[in-house]
Image (tube, rainbow, N blue to C red):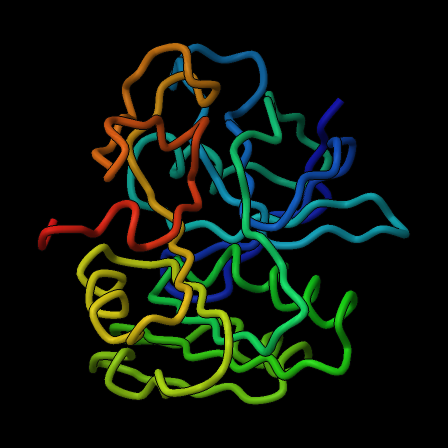
Amino acid sequence: MAVITENISVAENIRLMRVSGLKKGGCGQFYMIKPAETTDPLLGRPISLHDYDEISGVASFLYAVVGKGTRALSRLQSGMELTVHGPYGNGFKVFDSDAVLIGGGIGIAPLFMLAKDIGRRYPQKRVTAYLGFSSEPFMVDAFRDVCDDVFVNVGGYVTDDVDFSLDAVYYACGPTPMMKTAASKTNGARLYVSLENKMACGAGACLGCTCQTIAGNKRVCKDGPVFLSEEVFFDGR
């Protein structure tokens, strides 16, 4: 049984929800989540795993309140139950290498657990985060706790700040234009991007989140959401 232990506001229309009773997922994976025992909304909303506490078994989700489904989630309180399916998808691959994380807005959500995972597995490697926000920054101090360097851009283009000359693996999550720009600047370095498409089932059955790749159409929920940038941003797409 999935039960909310906390559901708090961290910025305007941005909330952090902690949930007990879930199977642990990997960094970059997501869950389909909705209030329990309701048909409005009928379908769960795909929300990336933000963090997972191994000791307590509590999963954290950082989400933006943007529509009916997330508004319904935002009204829930501690002790209330959720209907949750997952974890789904293929998440981020972690390498014995320095890492550069590029997040835009709510796209920073899955990058936090990624930073923690890299630090845990390869503590000798350097993790640098570039976080971009259109207005109010959020969760910056949390990133400073798990990254070696954190750079914040408010109201501009975070990709203008990124050093793309490093011998590192790059990761990005955020608005598609931001990720496309990052892909155009990597100069041959590996860049993994986490895509966000509208999803119905989350398990690859409905084909509602298909995206075009260099190898043909693929399902974001099942084959992704994480892809190499060269797979999905080719020929200017």
- Which residue shows up at 20% across the image and 69% down it? 184
Where in the figure is residue 21, as x and y percent of width and height?
78, 31
Residue 223 falls in image quadrant: top left
Residue at 42% of width from left, 79% of height from top? 130
Q: Where is residue 194 in the image (x, y as percent from the top left)?
A: 40, 50
**Would residue 79 be found to the left or right of residue 215 on screen?**
right
Quadrant for the N terminus, please.
top right
Closest to the observer, 222 or 69 = 222
Q: What residue is shown at x 53% (from left), y 62% (from top)? A: 111
In this rendering, the answer to whether 227 lies above or below 159 is: above
Q: In this view, does 173 lie to the left or right of 49?
A: left
Closer to the camera in the image, 117 or 10: 117
Is 75 situated above or below 52? above
Residue 5 falls in image quadrant: top right
Q: Where is residue 72 in the image (x, y as percent from the top left)?
A: 43, 32
The one nearer the camera, 39 or 236, is 236
